[in-house]
Image (spheres, rainbow, N blue to C red):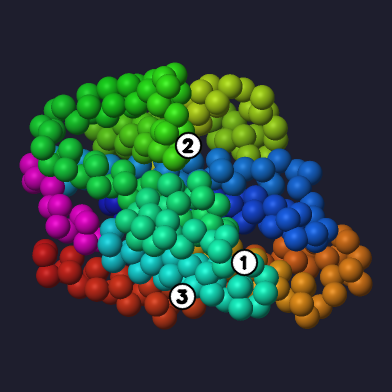
């Protein structure tokens, strides 16, 4: 039997671990840039970008699954409902962090004498940040709090494009469209002179390939991979993040492997609950993972400021400092995300739920 969209197991927990990989990627970079002791010798400290690619795959899997399920049941896609759902989930926290980031780099740090206000691209931040072109803004290097918004913009750009396509294309042609788009776009992204696609990280094929797997999972809900093959795919995924196994490949081959591996892992994980992985704690951490991703750069700035201006980090043993700094940032990020989810984001999620209830 096909599981309801809202009850796919293990995926919330996966979100948390992906957000954690992003934090582990940025922590040594932040410390190195400020002269703090840092540790980045393990592969898990180099997989933040890949974790974002898995986020893209997960979004593509869930959003395209939802759109296809709606289209085959009603022969229609309610664009108003789709976009309102995305607005109420994504916009509030995105714009909160965007506004804070602009004020932080344009006003707060210059007032503290820690940054020259003239070095901050305020016009570009306002223009590209508020129009969900933060992937363009990221090329101006406005600061970590704003630079992480690039991936959210890529997701929103894809959502804007894909929903009308599902509305206009006939059901029987959706899969063909996604396959054709994925192949053609992958070729143009990796093998042509369209440098701006790579410069602005417009990695839409992660979403579309995941959408293909999602649609196939709906078309053939009872199909199961042989256990040995499923186990091998999950093992490969673990090796991908915890070892340098795939390092040294060309960019195109690296992306090709990634865009196929990630949705396969998502599909396998979504089929059956893994009790430890699908625990109550991990599910909650997954629920607040959007906040964990969005707030971690702010948490690093705050903890970093404490060790730069209040506590002399040079008086602490390097190994102990690394454990304290990394652990404090992760814990502080989770706390911020927890309270943000319950006292800020939930307000908009309730609006979203009320709207869906009124529509049904």
Is residue 40 visible in the rendered image? The answer is: yes
Q: CA distance from mark 2 to mark 3?
A: 32 Å
Q: Looking at the image, which residue is at 24% across and 68% down?
A: 352
Query: Which of the two residues, 222 or 40, is positioned nearer the viewer here?
Result: 40
Give the magenta range: 74-85
Picture coordinates of residue 33 (x, y %)? 73, 56
- Which of discs 1 and 2 lies nearer the camera? The answer is 1
Please report whichever mark, 1 or 2, sits nearer to the chain's N-terminal start: 1
Query: Which of the two residues, 357 or 327, is positioned nearer the viewer here?
Result: 327
Please report whichever mark, 2 or 3, sits nearer to the chain's N-terminal start: 2
Instruction: Locate residue 325: give its quadrant.
Output: bottom right
Tell me, yes or no, whether the highlighted magenta stretch contains residue 77.
Answer: yes
Residue 100's place in the image compared with 47, above or below, is below
Answer with left or right where residue 307 lies relative to residue 89.
right
Question: Helix, strand, or loop for circle 2?
Answer: helix
Please report whichever mark, 3 or 1, sits nearer to the chain's N-terminal start: 1
Picture coordinates of residue 355 (x, y %)? 17, 69
Residue 77's place in the image compared with 283, above or below, is above
- Give the residue at mark 1: 116
Q: Looking at the image, which residue is at 52% across and 69% down?
A: 106
Picture coordinates of residue 344 (x, y %)? 39, 77
Q: Quadrant of the C terminus?
A: bottom left
Q: Which labelled disc corresponds to residue 199? A: 2
Residue 109's place in the image compared with 162, above or below, is below
């Amino acid at each position: 039997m096909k599981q309801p969209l809202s009850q796919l197991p293990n995926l919330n927990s996966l979100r948390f671990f992906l957000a954690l990989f992003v934090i582990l990627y940025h922590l040594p970079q932040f410390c190195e840039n400020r002269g703090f002791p840092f540790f980045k010798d393990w592969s898990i400290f180099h997989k933040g970008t890949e974790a974002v690619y898995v986020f893209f795959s997960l979004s593509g899997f869930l959003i395209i699954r939802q759109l296809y399920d709606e289209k085959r049941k009603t022969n229609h896609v309610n664009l108003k409902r789709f976009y309102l759902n995305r607005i109420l989930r994504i916009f509030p926290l995105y714009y909160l962090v965007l506004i804070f980031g602009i004020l932080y780099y344009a006003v707060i740090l210059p007032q503290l004498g820690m940054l020259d206000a003239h070095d901050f691209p305020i016009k570009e931040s306002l223009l590209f940040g508020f129009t969900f072109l933060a992937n363009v803004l990221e090329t101006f290097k406005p600061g970590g709090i704003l630079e992480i918004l690039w991936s959210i913009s890529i997701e929103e750009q894809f959502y804007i494009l894909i929903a009308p396509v599902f509305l206009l294309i006939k059901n029987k042609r959706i899969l063909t469209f996604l396959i054709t788009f994925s192949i053609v776009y992958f070729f143009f992204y990796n093998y042509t002179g369209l440098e701006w696609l790579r410069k602005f990280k417009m990695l839409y094929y992660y979403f579309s390939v995941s959408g293909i797997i999602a649609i196939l999972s709906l078309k053939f809900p009872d199909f199961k991979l042989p256990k040995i093959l499923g186990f091998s795919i999950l093992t490969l995924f673990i090796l991908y993040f915890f070892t340098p196994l795939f390092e040294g490949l060309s960019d195109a081959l690296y992306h090709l492997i990634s865009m196929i591996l990630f949705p396969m892992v998502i599909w396998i994980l979504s089929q059956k609950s893994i009790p430890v992985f699908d625990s109550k704690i991990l599910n909650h951490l997954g629920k607040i993972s959007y906040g964990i991703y969005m707030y971690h750069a702010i948490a690093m700035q705050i903890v970093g400021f404490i060790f730069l201006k209040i506590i002399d980090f040079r008086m602490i043993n390097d190994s102990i400092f690394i454990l304290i700094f990394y652990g404090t940032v992760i814990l502080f990020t989770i706390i911020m995300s927890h309270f943000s989810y319950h006292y800020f984001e939930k307000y908009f999620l309730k609006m979203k739920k009320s709207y869906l209830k009124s529509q049904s």
